[in-house]
Image: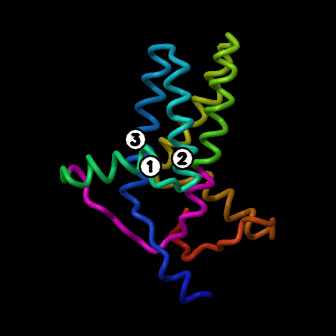
């Protein structure tokens, strides 16, 4: 298991692009007071969490960012599951925010701003709160959280 785990890879640049898009789109949604942009981000995060081939952030990275040379891939040994879990949490928070905003409650911006804050924490400081939660759940033996950290360098 340790050998197969060591062969697992994640492109950190792809994750950074997703974080940057999340931050930019949610800030734009807040500025424009657009619940629709919150829904778009939630859907993109859910597609990423489900590892769908047509996930919007993945497509943007693969078809725009990589070919343009704006950023180079940075593939490292890492587990994808904690990052997918973090995207799922973002999708859930943004989904709740969207529903609250749709109902007319300005409190819907609270979960959206939590996602903005956590995406910034990950983008700028490389701390993935969702990944940290995933690994804590793994340590506690909670079913479904099957991957242990590959190294001490992981968030």
Location of residue 1 (image quadrant): bottom right
Q: Is residue 47 above or below residue 96?
A: below
Q: Are marks 1 and 2 in contact (CB under 8 Å)?
A: yes
In the image, which is nearer the foreground, mark 3 or mark 1?
Answer: 1
Location of residue 23 (image quadrant): top left
In the image, which is nearer the foreground, mark 3 or mark 2?
Answer: 2
Q: Is residue 28 above or below residue 145?
A: above
Q: How many marks?
A: 3
Q: Secondary structure at mark 3?
A: helix
34 and 27: which is toward the camera: 34
153 and 48: which is toward the camera: 48
Residue 127 spot, x, y in % from top left: 53, 54
The residue positioned 25% from the left and 59% from the top of the image is 72
Report crowding for label 2: few under 14, some 14 to 19, many 20 or more residues within 10 A (C-alpha): many
The disc, 3 or 2, on the residue closer to the chain's N-terminal end is 3
Report crowding for label 1: few under 14, some 14 to 19, many 20 or more residues within 10 A (C-alpha): few
Find out whether residue 77 is within the magenta segment: yes
| Residue range highlighted in magenta | 70-86
Q: Which residue is mark 2?
A: 47
Q: Which residue is mark 1?
A: 54
The disc, 1 or 2, on the residue closer to the chain's N-terminal end is 2
Find out whether residue 84 is within the magenta segment: yes
Q: Which residue is mark 3?
A: 20
Q: Secondary structure at mark 2?
A: helix
């Amino acid at each position: 298991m340790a050998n197969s785990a060591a062969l697992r890879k994640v492109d950190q640049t792809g994750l950074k692009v997703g974080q940057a898009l999340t931050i930019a789109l949610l800030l734009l949604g807040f500025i424009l007071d657009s619940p629709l942009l919150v829904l778009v981000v939630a859907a993109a995060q859910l597609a990423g969490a489900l590892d769908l081939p047509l996930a919007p952030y993945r497509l943007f990275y693969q078809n725009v960012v990589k070919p343009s040379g704006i950023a180079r891939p940075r593939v490292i040994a890492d587990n994808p599951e904690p990052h997918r879990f973090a995207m799922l949490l973002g999708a859930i928070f943004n989904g709740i925010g969207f529903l609250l905003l749709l109902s007319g409650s300005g409190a819907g911006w609270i979960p959206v701003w939590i996602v903005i804050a956590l995406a910034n924490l990950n983008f700028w400081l490389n701390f993935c709160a969702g990944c940290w939660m995933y690994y804590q759940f793994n340590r506690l033996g909670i079913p479904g959280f099957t991957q242990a950290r590959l190294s001490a360098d992981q968030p």
